[in-house]
Image: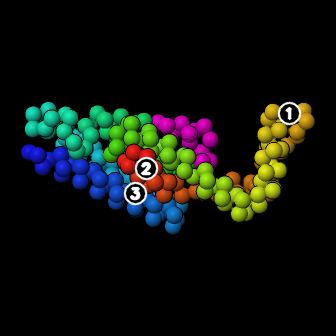
Amino acid sequence: MAILPTVLTVLAASTLSVLLVVATFHDCRSSRIPNRATYSAFLAALVIAAAKSIACHCGVLDWDAGGAISLAESLKGAGLCFGLLMAVQLSSFGNQLGAGDIKLATAIGALLGWEQGLQTLIWCFLLPAPYIVFLAVRQYGLVRLGREAVLRLGSKLFPRWFIVDAVPGEFAPFFRQRVPLAAFFALGVLFTVLGV
């Protein structure tokens, strides 16, 4: 039964790869991640994890054997990723994340487990920052953004001296534009799996 951990690993890796490619393609193209991709990957993750758990309980596999994660780890990963992104969604009044991003994170958590799922989420929120700064500099210019940053920081530190609108009208459209997070999820998974 030495081949079973390899089969489970290949199934999990293939599921994750297909999910990330499909999600990234659709998110970049139409700002939507198909439910068929996220639900299918989540279900496949649970089936693969259940197969490992059953094989371990029956004595066919050792719990420490390579391959997919256990069903308990899969559920913990899905729950953690879903809970964290749902908290971000609720705290931002629904303006920052799409439902597809939350479902994608849940499927990734189910495939990778809670530790690697959490690392992927951290990467997913760190990696877009340089991209967003690049877009802002390209659209508004470095001097204008620097001035705005000083005014905003000053209004927080010294509210009596700096009076600034919440979001000036000229910057509001920029903050409403969508960032295709699926591509950053894919990079986050890659960095996490490679141990970066």
**Where is residue 146 drawn, in percent x and y?**
79, 51
Query: In percent of the image, x 81 and y 44: which residue is there?
Result: 150
Near-viewer residue (195 or 65): 195
Q: Tell me the distance, in whole angstroms, between the alpha carbons under discs 1 and 3.
A: 45 Å
Task: Look at the numbered discs 1 and 3 and tell me whether their residues touch, using CB distance below 8 Å.
Answer: no
**Where is residue 96 drawn, in percent x and y?**
60, 48
| Badge 3 amino acid | Leu
Taking the image as shown, residue 63 lies to the left or right of residue 173, namely left
Q: Is residue 34 visible?
A: no
**Where is residue 64 drawn, in percent x and y?**
20, 35
Taking the image as shown, residue 64 lies to the left or right of residue 195, namely left
> Which of pointers 1 and 2 indicates the residue nearer the eye?
2
| Badge 2 amino acid | Phe
Secondary structure beneath dot 1 equals loop
Secondary structure beneath dot 3 equals helix
Region rendered in magenta: 82-96
Which residue is label 3 attached to?
Answer: 20
Circle 3 packing at 10 Å, graded few (<14), some (14-19), many (20+), is: many
**Where is residue 84 drawn, in percent x and y?**
49, 37
The image's mark for residue 191 is 2
Circle 2 packing at 10 Å, graded few (<14), some (14-19), many (20+), is: some
Q: Tell me the distance, in whole angstroms, between the alpha carbons under discs 1 and 2.
A: 41 Å
| Badge 1 amino acid | Pro
Which residue is label 1 attached to?
Answer: 159
Query: In percent of the image, x 46 and y 64: which residue is there?
Result: 26
Q: Is residue 156 above or below residue 46?
A: above
Magenta stretch containing residue 71, yes or no?
no
Upstream in the sequence, badge 1 or badge 3? 3
Query: In percent of the image, x 29 and y 57: which residue is there?
Result: 14
Snapshot quadrant of residue 157: top right
